Amino acid sequence: MKRSVNTALVGLALAGLLAGCTPPTGGAGASTSGPTAPATDVAASPEATATPSETPTATPSQTPTTRPVSIPTDCTDLVDAATYAATMGDAPLNDPAYFGQPMGQVAPTAPDADADLRDVVASAQVLRCGWADVRADVTGLFADVSTVDAATAAAYPAWLAEGREPTSVFWLDGVAYDCSEAYGGSLCQYVTTHPMYGVDMADTVLVRDDVVVTVSQRNFPTEDLMGSIVTRLWG
């Protein structure tokens, strides 16, 4: 995902998972800079009972099916209706006042010549979704689906797991993800705490076949959201 205003993952104040912090004021790819005063909650976050990080609720033992992936064209169809109501609730979806780029179903673009693998995956997005309130400082949920070539799919998990020197203030720049096999593919996750607001942030990436699903959270707990997305895409 690009390090511009968006999720594709991530935003001005970064991803968080716990309830109780104010909603975001910037896009999902912004730096950690932001207001220095404590935030006040001005937007409702969905009720959540899950652990802060987007971790499987049970040992992900689903066996890959032979059914081809079916990628929805609308963000409201990324999970089943019951999961959407319980997880996203009435959080603003793809608010143009928040996001500075096209959202929903999008066409892949050519990556820059010097793009790293994260940017290559972001340029291959076919569905880009964000649930965030423009009045918020931190809170937001972002989910993207990309279709990539075999070489990118094979290399991306190892690239995420490899620590490197950061070259920007992007909160995921240079961090090392924890990766394992799950959901019929490679699941990588990085969890941290926002330095100003003290809320959890997580980035969870599933690489399965030629599809990359990315879920970024800032003070937005979920209960096995990745599992629900997998069920929707692969059955």
Image (tube, rainbow, N blue to C red):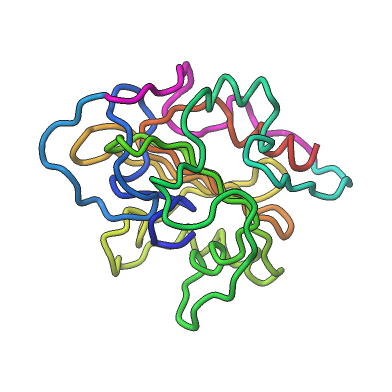
> 63 or 205, which lies in front?
205
Q: Main secondary structure of the magenta part?
A: loop
Asked where in the image residue 202 lies, by quadrant, the reply is: top left
Q: Is the residue 145 above or below the residue 52 in the image?
A: below
The residue positioned 74% from the left and 34% from the top of the image is 231
Total numbered labels = 0
The residue positioned 47% from the left and 48% from the top of the image is 178
The residue positioned 46% from the left and 42% from the top of the image is 95
> 186 or 172, which lies in front?
172
Q: Is residue 43 magenta?
A: yes
Q: Position of residue 208 (x, y in %)?
A: 70, 52
Q: Is residue 128 magenta?
A: no
Q: Quadrant of the C terminus?
A: top right
The residue positioned 79% from the left and 47% from the top of the image is 70
Q: Is the residue 211 above or below the residue 227 in the image?
A: below
Specify whether 170 is left or right of 69: left
Asked where in the image residue 165 lies, by quadrant, the reply is: bottom left
Residue that lies at the very extreme toward the bottom in this rendered image? 113
> 51 or 8, which lies in front?
8
**Which region shows up in magenta?**
42-63
Q: Position of residue 16 (x, y in %)?
A: 36, 36
Q: Position of residue 96 (x, y in %)?
A: 45, 47
Residue that lies at the very extreme toward the right in this rendered image? 66
